[in-house]
Image: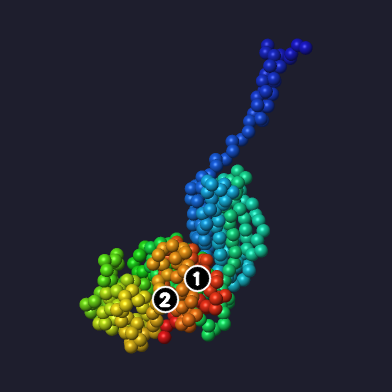
Amino acid sequence: MPGRSCGGFSLIPLVVFLAAFSLASGCKKASPPERLTPAKIHAITRELSEAAHAAAPKGTQIHLALEASAGNPEAADRLDITLPKGEADSVAQSETARIQQALGSVATRHGFTEAPSESREGILFFYLRGGTRTHQVHIHLRMAAAEQARSSSPQPNGAKLAIILDDLGSDRRAAEEIFDLPYPLTVSVLPNHEHSREIAEEAESRGYQVMLHLPMQAVASEKREAQELRPGMRAGEVSKLVHQFLANVPGAVGVNNHQGSEATSNPRLMRELMPVLRDHHLFYIDSRTTAATVAYQTAQSSRVPSAFRNVPFLDDVEQVEAVRKQLELALRGAREKGEAVAIGHPHPATLQALREVLPEAQSEGVQLAFASELVH
């Protein structure tokens, strides 16, 4: 059949061309989203954490688990956000909504979709990219660390163990891992480090006990702090330096020595230090970095509430199994002596061992306590 024409041109070829073009366009599939590498997922997890920190109320605990890996494409990074106990449900709901909004902004920027899930406590959801789960987010309420620990503690008059974690101040991430442990731990913060002040403030707000990890001169050629107590210092110099250190570690209620094998074995220096601590209403824990120490005896004679480390250091060997064995020795020491003071450091192996062993402490008849509870 002859085709209709317009101005001398046939319309049939044009119609056929447009139909073919439309069909071809309709069959063209959209490009799949770019697959994220584990490193990129981890970077986004940190962005989500930073957004949550900025939006969350003071006292919120945020823990990261970077689990995405090339070897396990089903694994997703985890972000656990624990709000402090609110005064009312409406307060918690408002805080949760604020955090979700902050997280959503990051997720939208990276092209994620959100998939809710069920949780018996709090809010649980996933972020997906191209149908693949990349992140699990859990927002839930929990009592502050100290409150939870007290609510689950054994009856009083049992064996007590105080665990002091030294050398805080430089590693912010290590501090956050400690803050994820819901036990009455004591953190001892070095002054004048990059994060000393904020770690001390946050530890206190989350219910942990804060001590000043007081730099003192050592006998050996260990790495020295820029400022430290040294034999030969006058009483006024000691007082001034301690005052400066305390200003940088707000909330400190006690002191233990950082290194100090030379300083703590010097009777004159210890006699100059103890009245300063007494005037600041601080207790003293002798870390016992040398058998020649006179610090505890001097504190006692100066009427400064005091105690000393009476079980081996937890992490002279930085391996999980080794730290676990030391923790078992500390628990045994607490049962045998009635109370024990243990000291460790925020090494990855130490923190992992604490996560594994501390839940067993109560069943072994030991009550975890703050260092202040064991001074006399």
* Residue furthest right in the image: 1
Residue 359 picture quarter? bottom right
Can the viewer see residue 27?
Answer: yes
Label 2 CA crowd tier, 10 Å (few <14, some 14–19, many 20+): some
| Up-down relation of residue 266 to residue 131 (above or below) | below
Say what secondary structure mark 2 lies in.
Answer: loop
Residue 310 picture quarter? bottom left
For the N terminus, the quadrant is: top right
| Mark-to-mark CA distance, 2 and 1 | 27 Å
| Picture residue at 59% right of the left edge, 51% below the top | 127
| Up-down relation of residue 23 to residue 54 (above or below) | above
Say what secondary structure mark 1 lies in.
Answer: loop
Q: Is residue 365 left or right of residue 246?
A: right
Q: Amino acid at mark 1?
A: Arg
Label 1 CA crowd tier, 10 Å (few <14, some 14–19, many 20+): many
| Up-down relation of residue 67 to residue 284 (above or below) | above
| Picture residue at 22% right of the left edge, 77% below the top | 232
Query: Residue 22, position in %: x, y?
Result: 67, 27
Dot label at residue 206: 1
Q: Earlier in the sequence, mark 2 or mark 1?
A: 1
Q: Which residue is mark 2?
A: 311
Task: Name the foreground residue: 192 vs 355.
Answer: 355
Can the viewer see residue 236?
Answer: no
Q: Amino acid at mark 2?
A: Val
Dot label at residue 21: none
| Picture residue at 59% right of the left edge, 61% below the top | 139
